[in-house]
Amino acid sequence: MSAAEHIQPGSPAGRERRPDTVQVWDPVVRVFHWSLVALFTFSFFTGDEWKTAHIYSGYAIGFSIAVRVVWGLFGSHHARFVNFLYHPRTVARFLIESAGMRAKRYLGHNPAGGAMVIALLSMITGIVATGYMMTTDAWWGVGWVEVTHKTLVYTTLGLIALHIGGVLFASLEHRENLVRAMITGRKRRD
């Protein structure tokens, strides 16, 4: 038998077979995630320069958050909040184990990732609410509303930095490209 006869149909010849993958992030989660990245970035850079576009971007963010909350209640398995919200002690234990590079791998959001989802959704909801308030007659020009809006924006930027750091750290710890997983929706099965 020649070497060519040993190749299984559908297997990549001359390459190592990729591990089995499973669909984890559905299209709603992925479109929400990357749309939020784009809209938040756009809103951040247009805030003082292009008010009308900034306001419409804020409305789009608000709509996206509403869709994500509904999907978090009724969507696919890994999208539902109930499947990735953990007790604070579990989150703390996960972070300690991660620091020692011995944290358990999760197919969906890990405990820290789940906490970050809720933190980011809460902060961005606050940004949208205060941004909307600033467009109304009742709240336009009220100092604490604008201060709160800007404080939430810059706090969210800090959370985003932590989120990116956590994704990179978990990717290294578990030898898995989590950015690619949020693009393709697929993760390694094991």
Image (spheres, rainbow, N blue to C red):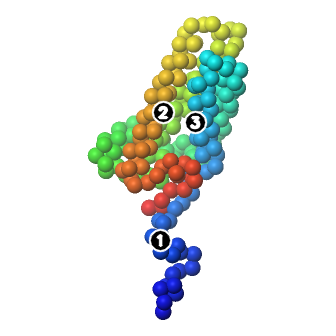
Q: Amino acid at mark 1?
A: Arg
Q: Position of residue 176 (x, y in %)?
A: 44, 54
- Residue name at image x 50 percent, y 18 percent: 151
Q: Is residue 61 left or right of residue 115?
A: right
Q: Earlier in the sequence, mark 3 or mark 2?
A: 3
Q: Nearer the viewer, mark 1 or mark 2?
A: 1
Number of other residues with Cα within 10 Å of mark 3, as a class: few under 14, some 14 to 19, many 20 or more: few
Secondary structure category for the residue under label 3: helix
Secondary structure category for the residue under label 1: loop
Q: CA distance from mark 1 to mark 2?
A: 37 Å
Which residue does the numbered mark 1 point to in the structure image?
A: 15
Q: Earlier in the sequence, mark 3 or mark 1?
A: 1
Q: CA distance from mark 3 to mark 2?
A: 10 Å
- Residue name at image x 47 percent, y 24 percent: 155
Q: 73 and 170: which one is in front?
A: 170
Number of other residues with Cα within 10 Å of mark 2, as a class: few under 14, some 14 to 19, many 20 or more: some
Which residue does the numbered mark 3 point to in the structure image?
A: 37
Q: Amino acid at mark 2?
A: Ile
Number of other residues with Cα within 10 Å of mark 1, as a class: few under 14, some 14 to 19, many 20 or more: few
Q: Are marks 1 and 2 in contact (CB under 8 Å)?
A: no
Asked if residue 73 can be seen in this view, the reply is no
Q: Which mark is residue 160?
A: 2
